[in-house]
Amino acid sequence: MTDAGVSDDALLAGMAVGDERAGVVFVRRYQRRVYGLALSMVGDPALAQDIAQEAFLRAWRHALVFDGRRASVGTWILTITRNLAIDSLRLRRPVVTDPADLMWVNLASRGPLPDERAESSDTRARLVAALASLPAEQSRALVLAAVYGYTAAEISEVESVPLGTAKTRIRRGLIKLRALNATHDLAGGGALP
């Protein structure tokens, strides 16, 4: 079985009947996104690998009961990963953490995001402040899209809003961030990336 041309639903159907080749193709197709999401949430490569492995095991075990009407396969596996990462963070912390707060983990601590490795902490602080100044739903949509790589359709499913609403939140959030960036740049503070 090759990766090209095989639908996600066909891979899950194969996994549901124990087809190891389908499982290998499925893992190869989603391993970067699953590991990337786990790493961005927990910040520990070894723990992120464990979370990714457990996410794929759960996908294998529950492939038979997957319901394509509720979510796409990509959204489903990323939701499994996200939930495992949240559970892992909760176990490691003495205080229960609100999942909404986890969106800010990479922006507020442990250094820059992968795409911003060369940038200063001042830039991160300005970005966090700019995102915090947006309405919560726009800020969440931007973080899900930019940090976690969610598509507008996935954001729509995660946030339980229509696709058009998810797109609008992303677009309006970006417009407001650009306006804040332009204002800050004109004031001599330097533009955000």
Image (cartoon, rainbow, N blue to C red):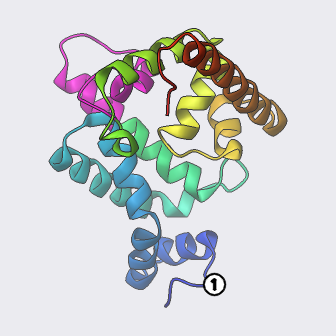
* SS for callout 1: loop
- Name above or below for residue 22 compared with residue 193: below
* Residue 61 in view in this figure: no
Pick the front one: 173 or 94: 173
63 relative to 41 in the view: left or right:
right
93 relative to 33 in the view: left or right:
left
* Residue 7 in view in this figure: yes
Q: Residue at x 55, y 9 (%)?
A: 187
Q: Which residues are magenta?
A: 85-112
Residue 180 image position (x, y, % from top left): 62, 15
Please rate how many residues cluster around mark 1, counting C-alpha atoms within 10 Å: few if below 14, some from 14 to 19, many from 20: few
- Name above or below for residue 26 compared with residue 140: below
Residue 25 image position (x, y, % from top left): 44, 78
Where does label 1 land, which residue?
A: 5
Q: Residue at x 68, y 56 (%)?
A: 68
Q: Residue at x 53, y 63 (%)?
A: 64
Q: Residue furthest right?
A: 164
Q: Residue at x 41, y 36 (%)?
A: 83
- Name above or below for residue 92 compared with residue 115: above
Pick the front one: 60 or 184: 184
Q: Is residue 96 magenta?
A: yes
